[in-house]
């Protein structure tokens, strides 16, 4: 099993007022070539696929063309989590459709840790890896504001919430792994 981990594509980012879409296109072409030449089985994308929560049409087109190309390659699975620049709901909108292409998208954290645990299967339909796909955890996702809260208290509670969330997701993945066998456990997330 060969993995390729990447993040922070920031598709659509403007450099000195110009979008430079050809740079992003070249990057995605290069990534596709690496996946083929290295015979990558699993591509992990840990957030910031786009530079803004409302990516332009050309950026979206590049993204979906890339995913379509990868779905027809040696890469059996793609796992994508949202980053702090991404719109979780935008990334998740085609989730059901993408799942049929073995592309797994986790945009928002869930109350149920199982929603962030993905079992990946090999070409013989045998479990080959478990991925804890934790999206970017926004303040509002993991804690409630307390009255008279200091900045230190806020940061401490935020860090505690992030740690607790990862621990719940990983504990759930460990339970699943005990049921299906000792296969690799991969934890990915986008922290900022």
Image (cartoon, rainbow, N blue to C red):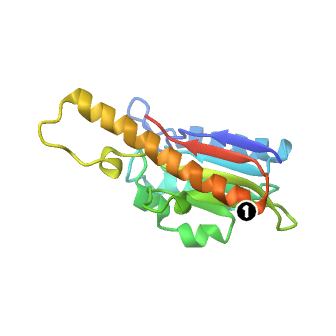
How many labels, in total?
1
Q: Quadrant of residue 33?
A: top right
Q: Which residue is mark 1?
A: 179
Q: Nearer the viewer, residue 140 or 167?
A: 167
Q: Residue at 26% across / 35% down in the picture?
A: 154
Residue at x 60%, y 57% (from the top left corner): 117
Q: Is residue 154 left or right of residue 127?
A: left
Observer able to see residue 154: yes
Instruction: Check the image and report above or below for 42 versus 16.
Output: below
Residue 26: horizontal and vertical position, in percent? 65, 40
Q: Secondary structure at mark 1?
A: helix
Q: Is residue 71 visible?
A: no
Residue 130 vs 25, above or below: the answer is below
Of residues 139 and 107, which is closer to you in this image? 139
Foreground residue among 66 and 17: 66
Residue 48 appears at what percent x and percent y?
Answer: 49, 43
Question: Which residue corresponds to the image point at 54% horizontal and 52% vertical from the top-left?
Answer: 169
Residue 38 placement (x, y as % from top left): 84, 41
* Residue 175 in the image, given as x and y percentages of width and height: 64, 57
Crowd band around label 1 with a 10 angstrom C-alpha radius: few (<14), some (14–19), many (20+) = few
Residue at the limit of the structure toward the left, as seen here:
148
The quadrant of the picture occupied by the C terminus is top left
Residue depicted at 64% across the width and 61% down the height? 103
């Amino acid at each position: 099993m060969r993995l390729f981990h990447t993040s922070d594509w920031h598709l659509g980012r403007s450099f000195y007022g110009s979008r430079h879409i050809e740079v992003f296109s070249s990057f995605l072409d290069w990534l596709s070539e690496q996946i083929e030449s290295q015979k990558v089985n699993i591509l992990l994308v840990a957030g910031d696929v786009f530079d803004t929560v409302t990516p332009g049409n050309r950026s979206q087109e590049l993204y979906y063309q890339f995913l379509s190309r990868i779905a027809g390659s040696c890469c059996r699975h793609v796992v994508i989590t949202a980053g702090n620049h991404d719109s979780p709901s935008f990334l998740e909108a085609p989730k059901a459709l993408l799942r049929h292409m073995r592309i797994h998208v986790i945009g928002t954290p869930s109350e149920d840790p199982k929603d962030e645990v993905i079992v990946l299967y090999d070409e013989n339909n045998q479990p080959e890896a478990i991925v804890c796909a934790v999206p970017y955890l926004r303040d509002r996702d993991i804690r409630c504001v307390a009255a008279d809260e200091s900045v230190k208290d806020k940061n401490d509670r935020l860090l505690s919430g992030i740690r607790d969330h990862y621990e719940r997701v990983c504990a759930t993945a460990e339970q699943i792994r005990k049921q299906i066998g000792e296969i690799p456990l991969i934890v990915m997330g986008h922290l900022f």
